[in-house]
Image (tube, rainbow, N blue to C red):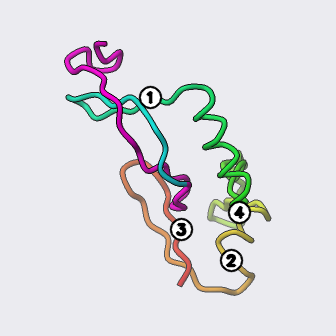
Amino acid sequence: MKCPICEKGTLHKGKVHEEMFGVLLGEFPAEICSSCQESFTDSETTARIELSAREKGIWGLGLKTKITRTGNSLAVRIPKKIADFLEFTEGKEAYIHPDAGKLVIEAR
């Protein structure tokens, strides 16, 4: 079968390491493109990947938040669930920088 993404490679059976937010969810069966390496899982495997993310407590960590003004600066609120996951606490030092159109906040 031809890859629906790149339309160059063919799909072959293999295994992929699935990761979410830097946490390894496991190795799962997938169809993998010989050209672009894009992987595709069936609905049963996708459900197993979601279950693994739920068991590891990382399902739903991607959340929307609002940018607000505080003095002359802008502020981003970090939802409690994400702060807990990253072990961010009030007063903890962090390093903030842009990276390819993203804002990265690293705990120190």
Three-letter amino acid code at the position of disc 1: Phe
The answer to whether the residue labelled 4 contacts the one labelled 2, judged by CB atoms less than 8 Å apart, is: yes
Q: CA distance from mark 4 to mark 2?
A: 8 Å
Q: Which image quarter is the N terminus in?
A: top left
Vertically, is 3 above or below 57? Answer: above
Camera sees residue 77: no
Q: CA distance from mark 1 to mark 4?
A: 28 Å
Depth check: give the residue in front, 10 or 86: 10
Q: Earlier in the sequence, mark 1 or mark 3?
A: 1
Mark in the foreground, 1 or 3: 1
Vertically, is 22 above or below 87? Answer: above
For label 4, the crowd category at 10 Å Cα-Cα, with few meaning under 14, some 14 to 19 and many 20 or more, is: some
Residue 6 painted magenta: yes
Three-letter amino acid code at the position of disc 3: Ile
Q: Which residue is mark 4?
A: 82
SS state under label 1: strand
Q: Earlier in the sequence, mark 4 or mark 2?
A: 4
Depth check: give the residue in front, 51 or 106: 51
Residue occupying the point 53% across, 68% down? 105
Count up the numbered dots.
Answer: 4
Q: Earlier in the sequence, mark 2 or mark 3?
A: 2
Q: Which mark is drawn over residue 40?
A: 1
For label 1, the crowd category at 10 Å Cα-Cα, with few meaning under 14, some 14 to 19 and many 20 or more, is: some
Start and end of the magenta stretch? 1-25
Q: CA distance from mark 1 to mark 2?
A: 35 Å
Q: Which mark is drawn over residue 105?
A: 3
Q: Which mark is drawn over residue 88?
A: 2
SS state under label 2: loop
Q: Which mark is drawn over residue 53?
A: none
Task: Tell me: 22 left or right of 70.
Answer: left
